[in-house]
Each structure stands twice: as C-alpha cells, then as structure tokens.
Image: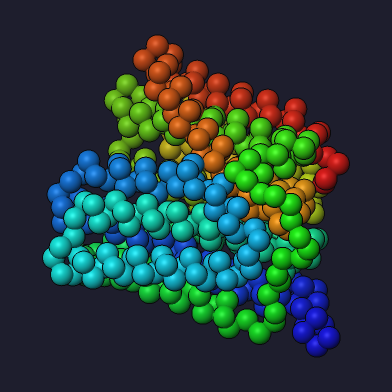
C-alpha cells in the first residue's frame, strides 16, 4: 500500500512514478550510447578504414533490422517480462560495442567487424524498443500515456539524434576507440537504472493463443483503429521520404536554394529540435486542444514542414520547420497511445513490429518516387505533393475518434 500511495502522489504531482523513471533513464542512457556508437562506427569507416562507401552501408544497416527483425522480436518480447528483455538486450549491445572498441584499440578493426556490429546492435534495438512500448501502459496510468510516451520520444530525439553524435565526434578526436567503448559503457549502465527500481515490475497476465509471424498482422486487421493509424503513418512516411530526398538536392544545388553545407545542416538539425519539443508537449496539446484536434494539427504540421523550403530564405524556413516538426512529431506519440490502448498486453510488441516494418519500408518508397520524378518534375511540385498526401490523411482521423 505504501508503494501504491507513493506512486499516486508522484503521478498527482506531475511525476510518472519510479518504474517509469527507471525505464526513461535506461532508455536515455542506451539511446545516447546508440547514437555515439553509430556515429563512432562511421568515423572509424571514414578515417581508420578510409572507406567512405562503407558509411552508406552502415547507415542502411542501422535501419534494416526494423524491416527484418521487428516482427520476430515482437513475438519473442510479448510473452516475456519487458524489463528483463531491456536489460538483457542492452547488456548484449554493451558487449557488442565494447568488442568493437577493444578490436579497434588492438589495431584489427575491419569492415566486417563494423558491419556485423552495427547490424547486431540494430536488431537488439528492436527488442529494447518493443519491450519499452509494451511496458509503458503497464506502469503508467492511462490518463498519463501521452506524457509518458512523449518523454520516451524526447529521449530518442534528444539523446540519440543530438547528444550522441557530438559526443562521438569529441571522443573520436581524443581516441578513435573511445566512442564504441563509451557507448558500450552507457548501455551497460542503463541496465542498472531498471535494477535500481524498488517497485515490482509487471509480468504478463493470463495466457495467449498460438502466435506466429502473422499474429501482429491479424491483430491490426481486426482493428479499425489500428488500420487507420498505420495507414496515416505509412502515407506520412512516404511523404517524408519524398521531402527528405527533394530537400537534400533542392537545398544544396546552385539551381535550387544554393545553401551552404552549414546552413543545410543547421536547418536539418532544427527539424529534430522541433520534433523533440513537440514530443514533450504532446500531452499538453491534447489537454489544450483535445486529442482529435491535435491529430489534425499533426497533419498540418507535417505539411508545413514539407512546404517550408518554398519560402527560400533560411530565416523564414527555420521557424516554419521548427513549428511544423513540433506539431508533426506529436503524431508519433499519439500513434503509440493508440497502439497501446487498442492492443492487449501480450500483443503490443508484435503490433509495434508490424508498424515499424511497414513505416520504415514506406520511407524508402517515398525516396524512390522522388528520385524517379526529380528530373522531370520540379522540386516545388514534389514538395507540394508530399504536403497534399499528408493533409489528405486528415480524412482518416474521424476513424480514430472512438478511441480518443
């Protein structure tokens, strides 16, 4: 009773309880380590192996696990205790990263070592993320899901995308082997954040039927809510793939915007900064505007982001990018809420696996479309197409209202 009362007081005072705090700290540390490791591996490829071509392969291998391993990982994760999965997976990641650091320090680093390590770390990430999403609704009250999921999204945006890379650059400059060693240390320490929690962690309740590779697909197929949510996410991912490809060329070409690499890098970074702020503010936006209106605003936010390059001046583009990405990123949090509320505890990681596999596959499709038509269709028209696709998904929002 004392622990329950403490948790209630924490929730009432704006906190989300000690178990979520432990989960968040673990995620923040492992996300930082993951960001350091990937950038550190690319730096080793460029400078130690002198193979810039290897960089593209490493970056691809960081995302491919979501296409090939996310669904199997969900099947493995769902019947298990989520906090244990996170600990074991992060310990395995720590061992992989430290091994790269030791091999590098010994002067035996190779392309094979980096390729295998990055892929293994990516596969283990699918287990960590699946278990974390499955755990959140079991340790946080339903009314606080947006706040909790927003906090987890901030961890990914800030610690993985912004904190990890500069730390990797600094540590590599000091000693090339330091980046993988530090990343492994952080992933190892992240397991202690969960071990330090004194409250009992939830375990799976009740039995489950037969599970196979199609289980997550069947769950989505039976749910109007999940089908609408995944359709919105897939269309948005296609539009985002178009935008990313077009903007990279349009911003840096002399016939386009003609930005310097520094200006392009700053603007790209501002998208992540806005997304982090949006993820953090999702719960507040829902309380202010309502859940459904916030969903519609996420569609408008993405459209603003996609159209922002048409303003041409970086001083005008920057604030629109930040505002657009802030509202757009709220959808990721809301999609997490929908998945968690529409899925039983024994199926959440599988459903996440299907979501990630389809949405990660949709982004390259958008890039392929942009590449195919970029020489025959103007960049502004392609950006406008991405915006129209995203705004069109507002029509799917009413399907979600019954769960909001």
Horizontal and vertical percent position of residue 381:
50, 18
309 versus 374 height, above or below = below
Q: Is residue 70 left or right of residue 367?
A: right
Residue 20 rendering spot, x and y as whole percentages? 66, 71
Q: Nearer the viewer, residue 305 or 148?
A: 148
Q: Position of residue 85 (x, y in %)?
A: 56, 66
Kindly identify the residue that appears in the image at 53 percent across and 61 percent down: 128
- Which residue is rendered at x = 68% and y = 53% of the image? 348
Locate residue 92 relative to residue 219 in the image: left or right: left
- Residue farthest to the top, as pictured: 376
- Of 36 and 58, nearer the camera is 58
Q: In the image shown, does 57 or 312 lie closer to the viewer?
A: 57
Give how far across and how far down residue 92 sits, in percent: 42, 67
Quarter holding the N terminus? bottom right
In this image, 70 relative to 65: left or right?
A: right
- Vertical side of 137 occupied by 372: above or below: above
């Amino acid at each position: 009773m004392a622990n329950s009362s403490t948790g209630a007081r924490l929730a009432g005072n704006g906190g989300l309880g000690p178990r979520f705090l432990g989960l968040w700290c673990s995620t923040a540390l492992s996300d930082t380590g993951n960001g350091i490791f990937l950038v550190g591996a690319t730096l080793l490829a460029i400078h130690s192996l002198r193979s810039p071509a290897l960089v593209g392969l490493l970056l691809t291998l960081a995302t491919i696990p979501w296409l090939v391993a996310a669904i199997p990982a969900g099947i493995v994760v769902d019947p298990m205790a989520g906090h244990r999965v996170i600990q074991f997976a992060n310990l395995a990641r720590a061992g992989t990263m430290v091994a790269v650091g030791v091999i590098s320090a010994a002067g035996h680093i190779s392309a094979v070592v980096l390729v295998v390590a990055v892929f293994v770390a990516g596969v283990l990430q699918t287990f960590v993320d699946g278990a974390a999403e499955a755990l959140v609704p079991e340790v946080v009250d339903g009314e606080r899901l947006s706040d909790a999921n927003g906090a987890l999204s901030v961890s990914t945006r800030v610690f993985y995308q912004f904190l990890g890379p500069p730390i990797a650059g600094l540590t590599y400059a000091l000693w090339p082997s330091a980046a993988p060693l530090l990343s492994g240390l952080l992933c190892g320490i992240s397991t202690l954040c969960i071990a330090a929690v004194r409250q009992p962690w939830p375990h799976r309740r009740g039995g489950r039927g037969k599970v196979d590779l199609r289980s997550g697909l069947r769950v989505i197929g039976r749910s109007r809510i999940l089908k609408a949510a995944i359709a919105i996410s897939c269309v948005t991912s296609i539009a985002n793939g178009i935008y990313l490809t077009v903007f990279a060329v349009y911003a840096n070409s002399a016939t386009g915007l003609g930005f310097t690499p520094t200006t392009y890098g700053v603007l790209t970074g501002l998208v992540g900064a806005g997304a982090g702020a949006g993820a953090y503010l999702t719960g507040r936006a829902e309380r202010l505007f309502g859940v459904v209106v916030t969903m519609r605003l996420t569609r408008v936010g993405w459209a603003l982001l996609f159209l922002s390059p048409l303003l041409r001046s970086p001083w005008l583009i920057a604030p629109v990018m930040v505002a657009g990405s802030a509202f757009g990123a709220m959808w990721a949090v809301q999609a997490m809420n929908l998945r968690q509320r529409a899925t039983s505890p024994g199926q959440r990681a599988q459903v996440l696996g299907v979501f990630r596999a389809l949405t990660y596959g949709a982004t390259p499709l958008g890039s392929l479309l942009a590449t195919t038509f970029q020489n025959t269709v103007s960049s502004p028209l392609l950006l406008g197409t991405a915006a129209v696709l995203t705004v069109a998904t507002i029509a799917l929002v009413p399907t979600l209202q019954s769960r909001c």
